[in-house]
Each structure stands twice: as structure tokens, then as C-alpha cells.
């Protein structure tokens, strides 16, 4: 989908971070936007900024843990502008706790938000794509969707699961013009570490030092949109850390030796 002008995009996690940056980048491409997150006031703020740019947008707040509401929400998203051309499954949550101190309730919550909500949105929007002759789904995964990392067992598992589902989706519906792009950012300067679930189920409340040195959400959003326009299947986004993916692929023993020396933060 090289030209996004006059296309309609639905973005989850649109009230902050990468999702908010995606909104502005898509606005510059001439898209109409459907904005979703569980923070209605922040969505209205983003909508106001988009309106000042002349971009048409609709606010559609909902909680990603409310899986049963998603089919109805998807229909509202479609009816907002009469059609949806792109879906950015971007909303998510991270984690900061060792495996043994992480209660199953936390694992379930992270999987509900990061994985099940994404596939529920996809299953709700897929018939619309098939009826309209195709569409494009962009999924925000992570480099942690390609290998494990300390203190992020459930987060990594949820991101790994996305790859299995969306790679299958792309294969099954390739002839129906349903396209998939999986974005794998490294550290991005957002509040993901601040909002990450601690062992007690509450927000971690701290900005990780490495996170604070990551790329900007704007740079990440631009890379995602560029990948979508080029119909890339998987895109690695970030700095030198991306080399870790290739080290694991070609030198797995070295990779595990290096990753075992990472200080958990």
C-alpha cells in the first residue's frame, strides 16, 4: 500500500508513545484515523491536535482486556468512515518481574492485552477486509518477540505468540490481498517501563535507564509506516541492538552467552 492518502487507519494504544506518534505520521500521509485506547481524555487530546492539522479522526475508547467487546468495537470502527483499510495493533503492556515472583494472573493479563486482544481485533476486522478486497495489519511486536530477555517472561511470550499467529495469517490469506507487517522495535523512549506490571500487579513506576536512551516514538512510527508502505513482512527497528537477532540466528551459542550476562533492569 504505497499511497496511504484517503485511507482509513485504526490504531490501538493511540493515546501515547508509539501509537500517538503513528497517528501524527499517518495524518501526514493523508489518512482518516480511528483512535483507540483505555484513556478517553488523552485520546481527545490527540484528536484535538490532529484536528488542528486538518485530519479527520474519531475517538473510540475501550479496554483491551475486554475481549468480548471487540467485535462491537470493530463494527463501530468500520462505520466511523465506512471502511477500514489499515489496522495498527499497537496497544500493549510490558513486565518487570522474575518468573517465580510473577503470579499467573499477571501472565494472563499480559497475554490478554498483548496477544488475545490483537487476534480478536484481527478476527473481527478480517471479514471486512475480505469483502473489500484486502487490507493491511501492522503489529507492534518487539525484539523481545524474537528472543527471551530477563524480567520479561510473559511479555516475551506474548510477543512470540504474535509472530506465530500473524505469520500464519499472512500465509492463509495472501491470495485475498491481506497484508501483514510485524514491527520489532528495540528500546523506544516511551513510558512502557513505567507502566510495566511489577510482581504485585501494579505499575513498575520507573523509567529504565536503557529505555530512556532509546529511539524516539516518532522515529519508530516513521519506520513502521515506511515498512507498511513497502509491504515488509518483518521490520527490525532501533539501534545497534538489532544485531542481536542475527547473532542468535547464526551464532546461537554466542548469543546465549552474551544474553546471560545482561543485568536485569
Image (tube, helix red, strand yellow):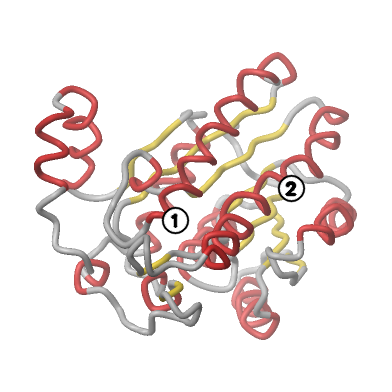
Q: Residue furthest top?
A: 175
Residue 17 is situated, as x and y percent measured from the top left of the image, at 46, 69
Camera-side mark, 2 or 1: 1
The residue depicted at 60 percent of the width and 36 percent of the height is: 3
| Residue 104 in the image: above or below residue 71 | below
Which numbered circle lies on residue 155?
1
Image quadrant assignment for residue 97: bottom left
Direction front: furthest residue: 100
Residue occupying the point 52% across, 35% down: 181
Which percent across, then down, holds residue 196? Answer: 43, 72
Position of residue 161 relative to residue 78, above or below, is: above
Q: Position of residue 39 (x, y in %)?
A: 65, 79
Q: Residues within 10 Å of mark 2 (few under 14, many from 20)?
A: some
- Label 2 sits on a secondary structure element that is helix
Q: In this figure, which residue is indicated by the disc labeled 2?
A: 120
Viewer-proximal residue, 261 or 166?
Answer: 261
Which of the 4 image quadrants contains residue 69?
Answer: bottom right
Q: Is residue 125 left or right of residue 161?
A: right
x, y percent for residue 128: 85, 37
Looking at the image, which is closer to me, 88 or 158?
A: 158
- Mark 1 lies on a secondary structure that is helix
Point out the tag, 2 or 1, that comes first from the N-terminus: 2
Q: Is residue 144 above or below residue 230?
A: below
Residue 111 or residue 84, whichever sits in front: 111
Labels 2 and 1 touching (C-beta < 8 A):
no
Amino acid at each position: 500500500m504505497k499511497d496511504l492518502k484517503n485511507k482509513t487507519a485504526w490504531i490501538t494504544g493511540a493515546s501515547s508513545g508509539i501509537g500517538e506518534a503513528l497517528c501524527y505520521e499517518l495524518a501526514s500521509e493523508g489518512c482518516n484515523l480511528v483512535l483507540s485506547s483505555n484513556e478517553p481524555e488523552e485520546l481527545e487530546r490527540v484528536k484535538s491536535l490532529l484536528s488542528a492539522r486538518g485530519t479527520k479522526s474519531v475517538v473510540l475508547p475501550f479496554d483491551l482486556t475486554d475481549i468480548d467487546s471487540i467485535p462491537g468495537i470493530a463494527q463501530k470502527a468500520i462505520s466511523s468512515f465506512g471502511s477500514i483499510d489499515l489496522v495498527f495493533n499497537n496497544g500493549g503492556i510490558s513486565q518487570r518481574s522474575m518468573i517465580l515472583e510473577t503470579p499467573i494472573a499477571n501472565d494472563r493479563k499480559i497475554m490478554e492485552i498483548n496477544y488475545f486482544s490483537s487476534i480478536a481485533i484481527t478476527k473481527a476486522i478480517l471479514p471486512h477486509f475480505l469483502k473489500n478486497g484486502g487490507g493491511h495489519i501492522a503489529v507492534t511486536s518487539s525484539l523481545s518477540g524474537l528472543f527471551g530477555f530477563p524480567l520479561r517472561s510473559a511479555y516475551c511470550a506474548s510477543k512470540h505468540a504474535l509472530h506465530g499467529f500473524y505469520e500464519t495469517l499472512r500465509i492463509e490469506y495472501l491470495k485475498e490481498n491481506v497484508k501483514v507487517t510485524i514491527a520489532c522495535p528495540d528500546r523506544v523512549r516511551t513510558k512502557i517501563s513505567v507502566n510495566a506490571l511489577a510482581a504485585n500487579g501494579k505499575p513498575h513506576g520507573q523509567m529504565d535507564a536503557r529505555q530512556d536512551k532509546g529511539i524516539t516514538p516518532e522515529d519508530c512510527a516513521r519506520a513502521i509506516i515506511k515498512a507498511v508502505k513497502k509491504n515488509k513482512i518483518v521490520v527490525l527497528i532501533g539501534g545497534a541492538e538489532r544485531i542481536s537477532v542475527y547473532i542468535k540466528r547464526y551464532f546461537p551459542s554466542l548469543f546465549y552467552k552474551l544474553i546471560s550476562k545482561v543485568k536485569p533492569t
